[in-house]
Image (tube, rainbow, N blue to C red):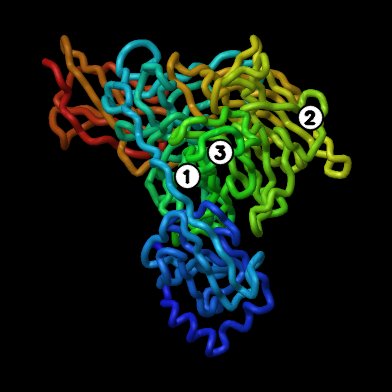
């Protein structure tokens, strides 16, 4: 159960009067949304970091239109801050004044203001095309009629791959009738399905990977609806038994966008939001009341749901920095920034990739100040040959300081081929130089999505986004393995991770009888340590005996045995130990 601690504002003021607030005076407190923010949510909470929850002191919050706001204090789970959650929303377009006794960074004697955005039309779901649950590229299982994932084919084996399985979020390419149902999936190194989890109609699952939560490996993904490259949903956290143990929701009334769900060692999650706001673009010869997507970064306390950090692109990056055309008609939308990755840097700050400004930004953790820009119209670094990128995705800082990213170079085309690259930064001379460059043969342009994952031992895994490929390269650039999705299927990102699951479900079994023989089909969704299957059969459900043992044949294994009234199967590991036994069933047929 999640633990949540709340105090009334009056109780906090009393704590200060009793002397609990003296510790706050020695430490500058960071406030979010940061003082001066121009596009805060009407449902925003006011978060304070760097102070014990009991030392916040009295907080006064007043809107220029909505008046004084009461609220409650929610302590952050790490004890290093708390959030003031107003009892009612603020008015759109108003200025909110916050007064505290705290030494707030960028405040004046503890006071500061933020402005509430005027909201544009919300992002809504689109009508989903019907699922294609037959034909080439679709997997079908007798023992699991409910699972219909697309295929992944492995080829070009030119050396051993890094250890681990492949993690993808399968869905149909936009405007195409792709095969199979959408959902998170795990494949082994040979492209054989290990686990698939179909999501409800109208939803997708993106950014499927293994991360650490509370010191243990977990399976995470974003789930929700996508509309024109942005979306609204939540993050899901599952344990190694495929049980959901937590949900990550964006704060301040927002819905989380699909482009990032990054867990941190501190028990928090970095997420992004695309929030439509009304914005004056007349200075750029655009519409006076355009709808601009404000890209928002939030750090969420997973235990309490509180916002620990918040950054708004419109406060720090001009719309004119975008390579998207400016809308000239009121009400038309401008996705000028389009955030598509968020990560921590080794020094504790934040790194963000913005597709539509062709720029990677390093942000200060304290107040969101842009510390440097890599690429785009105002790069802080001189881009040496081979380093220029366009419409990029998945910027990550590696332990040696290299910035890795997927350079789409397309939509519209700027380069002849997409690629995965590593860029080194000379911060003294302000130069960016090329360290790694992985390109497909023949050249391939990905119109959207994509990622590059640094693997243990120096290998690189590249997910080609809207192009239906995954490739693994050695540290010297040799192609080790090529994976191809069924036509019409794709994945936002692709990863390789070790994974040791322990499904709580039982194996599934199906059987049919014809001409005195029984065909038995067996599978165990999510298990990866099954080496063989033992088939049990008999004249009654209570008198089953072993009749056959077969080697595991992938996601589903089959065996032919003499006819019987009842059958069950047992999954066994490489030592012959029984891992689990299915239910007992009667076969279909005559």
Residue 548 in the image: state x and y as whole percent.
31, 23
Name the foreground residue: 297 vs 41: 41
* Quadrant housing residue 547: top left
Quarter of the view holding residue 480: top right
On the image, numbered disc 1 is attached to which residue?
A: 277
Please tell me whether mark 2 or mark 1 is closer to you in this view.
1
Which mark is in front, 3 or 2? Answer: 3
Where is residue 530? Give x, y as percent. 42, 32
Q: Is 83 situated left or right of 242 in this image?
A: right
Q: CA distance from mark 1 to mark 3?
A: 12 Å
In the drawing, does residue 130 fall left or right of residue 460?
Answer: left
| Residue 276 in the figure: left or right of residue 586 | right
Q: CA distance from mark 2 to mark 1?
A: 39 Å
Q: Is residue 193 left or right of residue 495?
A: left
The residue most toward the left is 590
Residue 461 appears in the picture as rendered: no
Q: Which residue is mark 3?
A: 281
At mark 3, the secondary structure is: loop
Q: CA distance from mark 3 to mark 2?
A: 39 Å
């Amino acid at each position: 159960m999640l633990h949540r601690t709340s105090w009334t504002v009056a109780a906090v003021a009393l704590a200060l009067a009793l002397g609990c607030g003296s510790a706050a005076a020695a430490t500058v407190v960071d406030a979010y949304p940061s003082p001066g923010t121009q596009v805060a949510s009407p449902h925003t909470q006011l978060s304070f970091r760097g102070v014990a929850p009991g030392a916040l002191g009295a907080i006064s919050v007043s809107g220029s239109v909505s008046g004084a706001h009461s609220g409650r204090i929610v302590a952050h789970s790490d004890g290093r801050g708390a959030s003031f959650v107003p009892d009612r929303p603020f008015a759109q377009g108003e200025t909110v004044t916050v007064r505290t006794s705290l030494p707030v960074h960028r405040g004046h004697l503890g006071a500061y203001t933020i402005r509430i955005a005027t909201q544009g039309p919300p992002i809504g779901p689109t009508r989903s095309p019907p699922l294609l649950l037959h034909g080439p590229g679709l997997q079908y299982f007798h023992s699991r009629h409910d699972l219909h994932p697309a295929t992944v084919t492995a080829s070009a084996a030119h050396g051993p791959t890094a250890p681990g399985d492949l993690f993808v979020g399968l869905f149909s390419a936009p405007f195409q009738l792709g095969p199979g149902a959408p959902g998170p999936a795990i494949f082994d190194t040979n492209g054989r399905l290990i686990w698939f989890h179909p999501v409800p109609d109208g939803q997708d699952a993106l950014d499927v990977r293994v991360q650490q939560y509370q010191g243990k490996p977990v399976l995470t993904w974003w789930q929700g609806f996508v509309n024109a490259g942005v979306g609204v949903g939540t993050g899901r956290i599952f344990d190694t038994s495929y049980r959901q143990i937590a949900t990550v929701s964006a704060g301040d009334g927002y819905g989380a966008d699909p482009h990032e769900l990054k867990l941190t060692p501190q028990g928090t999650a970095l997420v992004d939001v695309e929030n439509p706001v009304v914005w004056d673009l007349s200075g750029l010869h655009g519409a006076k009341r355009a709808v601009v997507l404000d890209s928002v970064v939030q750090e969420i306390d997973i235990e309490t749901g509180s916002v620990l950090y918040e950054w708004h692109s419109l406060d720090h990056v001009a719309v004119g920095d975008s390579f998207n055309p400016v809308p000239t008609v009121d009400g038309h939308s401008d996705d000028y920034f389009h955030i598509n990755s968020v990560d921590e840097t080794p020094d504790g700050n934040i790194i963000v990739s913005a597709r539509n400004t062709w720029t990677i930004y390093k942000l200060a953790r304290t107040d969101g100040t842009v510390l440097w820009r890599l690429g785009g119209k105002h790069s802080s670094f001189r881009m040496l040959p081979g380093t220029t990128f366009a419409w990029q995705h998945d910027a990550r800082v590696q332990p040696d300081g290299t910035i890795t990213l997927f350079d789409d170079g397309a939509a519209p085309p700027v380069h002849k081929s997409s690629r995965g690259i590593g860029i080194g930064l000379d911060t003294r001379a302000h130069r960016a130089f090329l360290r790694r460059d992985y390109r497909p043969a023949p050249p391939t342009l990905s119109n959207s999505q994509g990622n590059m994952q640094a693997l243990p031992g120096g290998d690189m895994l590249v997910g080609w986004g809207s192009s239906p490929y995954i490739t693994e390269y050695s540290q010297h650039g040799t192609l080790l393995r090529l994976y191809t999705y069924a036509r019409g299927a794709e994945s936002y990102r692709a990863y390789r991770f070790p994974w040791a699951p322990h499904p709580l479900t039982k194996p599934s079994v199906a059987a049919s009888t014809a001409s005195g023989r029984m065909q038995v089909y067996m599978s165990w969704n999510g298990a990866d340590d099954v080496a063989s299957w033992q088939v049990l059969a008999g004249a009654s459900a209570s008198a089953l005996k072993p009749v056959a043992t077969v080697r595991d044949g992938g996601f589903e294994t089959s065996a032919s045995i003499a006819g019987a009234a009842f059958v069950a199967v047992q999954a066994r590991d490489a030592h012959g130990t029984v891992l689990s036994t299915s239910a007992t069933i009667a076969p279909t047929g005559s």
